[in-house]
Amino acid sequence: MDLQEFRTGLDAWLDEHEPELAAGFGPEVSFDAEMAHLSKVKRMTFDAGWMRWGWPERVGGLGGSTLMRAYLGEALAARDMIEPGIYSMTEVLAPTMIGFARPELAAEMVPRLLRGDETWCQGFSEPSTGSNLGSLACRARRDGDAWRVSGQKVWTSLAQYAHRCVLLTRTGPPESGSRGITALFVDMDSPGITVRPIRALHGRDEFCEVFFDDVRVPDDRRLGEVDGGWAIAMDLLPYERSTSLWHRSAYLRQRLGHLLASAPEGALDPAELGEVVQMAFAFHARSRATQHRMARGERLGPETSIDKVLLATTEQAVFDLVAGAVPAAVALGGDADGDRWRTGFLYSRAATIYGGSAEIQRDIIARRLLDLGDGR
Amino acid sequence: MMDADTAELLAQSLERAFRNTSGKEVEAALEEVGWREALDEEGAAVVPLLFARQGEANATSGALDDVLTSALGLPTGPGTAFVLPEFGAYAPPGSLHDGDLALQGLGSARMAAADRAVVLATRPDGALSAVVVDTGEVEVRPIGGVDPRLGLCAVGGRHVSATGETPVTPAAWDAALAVGRVALAHELIGASRTMLRLAREHALTRVQFGKPIAAFQAVRHRLAECLVAIDSAEAAAGAAIGADSEVSPLLAGMAKAVAGRNARTVARHCQQVLAGVGFTDEHDFHRYFRRVLTLDGLLGDARTLTRALGEELLRERRLPAAPPL
């Protein structure tokens, strides 16, 4: 299957299934309902084959170019069938499993994630470990053929729904920094795990605190080498800044298109509108080039920090435009449209914070792309 | 379509050509490289190769004249210049009444030595014509301005007689503007890259408080911001040229606006990092700063293009399609 064939076939299929796939919006749509809808969309697209293209056959995929994955998320976001933030987590978690889990474990688990049978989360950040990931403290201690995990994670998206967690733990001495980290694939129903959702600014319990109290994790659930977890994190973070951002670009274009179609006469200043549309175009062009590099098998690295800076800047510019054009809808709107503008606007404030803050991205660009030294 | 090796060879030759200091020598070197033949054969695909390097080198040539002349399907040559619209704008610089041409526009460094000039002119019924005139018949006045090394001149005249006239459809003029804008976008990006290189070198060698200023986050983040600005402008300019070498007028206009706006961002940050030395004529930075201020004004500046885009979008009330994956 080539991309053109995939696009034509998928578009027709989405047209046909529009009513079942359309997402609901508005103050009465709970996050539980949003998650249930996401699972439904993943299941339907998996069963029809679309979700399987672009993933290796050994994990239940149908093979072919990763561009098909990029297009599937783009098409679903452009048609308002998914919220890309929660949809695109697959793009980060599945490649980690494919790259680092035992082949049998990856083959068993990845299809469940792709099909929406399971939700997974990513346990990286900790209360004392935000931008400085190498300082994490959540401890894993060897216990025969297993590990015992004790510690705390925070900002763990969707942990309250998650069946599994890709967890970074400290296995070396406390001062071992990035050298003493090990990644584990943890069942979230293991005894000793407590999840506390955190209500976020945009009104969703999207993130959680996760507490581990002597949680047993078999060693066959280890991802990669003992003390080799840093390589996994470094390998995975560029994914967080590639296909997921392409999906987000489609979402921003959808929002911008809706604003343009619905803003009252005189609400949009042509110069401001023109500038935001140009920014969205430049971001789209950059992210598109990244998708093609990935599809050619190029290894993604620190240059994806440019993509992340552009996403964050563009997303905030789009919603600043929204807040200027339809201020009453954002501040007061009680209908589905107003609720969605408000949620989107509030969530956009996090774009310069999550997934590596704006400052960390610029640090990476300065050190790795401009070769300015380590800043000391 | 040019293969990667051919493109690389051409790029290297162009880079050498731009090491010449005078516009005349650059023109001769480009002639030797066979730039116009490459343009005829490959179309827009070779435009980024040349203009990025011209921008990086702070060089000047008549390559933009060639690009615009060729896009209108007219014969190019070292003696043929193209009259550019007035600064900041993109309306055709000429108007034609009963074979009588009036014009007001800008000329590149080639204009002074050219025998002929191509003028895009509007007829009373609104139709467009590409008119060829003898440069002896028009007034050519050098402009010093902020960037004297660019060799820009003011071109004007009344009652100028045409030696040739070709009808031009609005779509053909849009297409010519598009390829010219992509060229200028790449030249702005090239100039931006050199500004960043100069600021980076300075940051790594200038020591204050016992360490290179590149160690300070305020400096590092300014330079990082420059790379973001440059790479996004380059992605936009790249996306404006399709796989078939066709240039989208809409995307080219957006790419030129992004490149012009981002080049000013780069100039602002680099100048701050270069500090005092970047404010002198003794350091090369100023040449690039002067260049981007001027290039932004050719074929529509960022401000004008951005407002025009916004107005067009508000008329259509639809977001135009972006290039598919």
Image: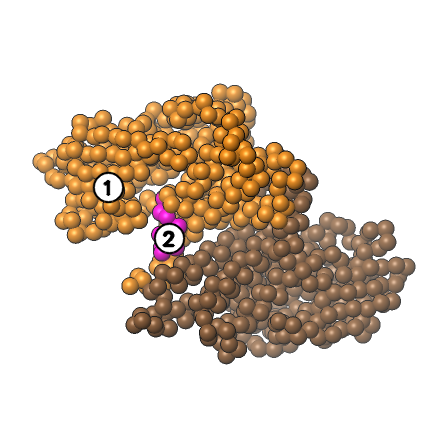
Residue B71 at least partly seen: no
Residue mark closest to the camera, 2 vs 1 = 2
Give the main secondary structure, helix, strand or loop, of the magenta stretch: helix
Question: In this structure image, what is the colour of chain B?
Answer: brown
Q: Residues within 10 Å of mark 2 (few under 14, many from 20)?
A: some
Q: Residue at x 44, y 23 (%)?
A: A29
Q: Residue at 69% x, 63% y: name it.
A: B87
Amino acid type at image mark 1: Leu
**Is residue A96 within the magenta segment?**
no
> What is chain A's hue in the picture?
orange
Could you tell which of marks 2 and 1 lies nearer the N-terminus?
A: 1
Front position in the image: A334 or B35: A334
User: Residue B247: horizontal and vertical position, in percent?
Assistant: 63, 51
Query: What numbered label is drawn on residue A359?
Result: 2
> Judging from the image, what secondary structure is the residue with disc 1 in?
strand
Residue farthest toward the top in the current orientation of the protein: A20
Q: Identify the residue under disc 1.
A: A168
Determine the residue located farthest toward the left in the rendered image: A144
**Residue type highlighted by circle 2:** Glu
Q: Residue at x 39, y 55 (%)?
A: A362
Q: Residue under mark 2: which chain is it in?
A: A
The magenta span reads: A355-364
Q: x%, y% of residue B36?
A: 65, 65
Residue A262 location (% of width, % of height): 61, 33
Q: At 52% across and 20% down in the image, what residue appears?
A: A19
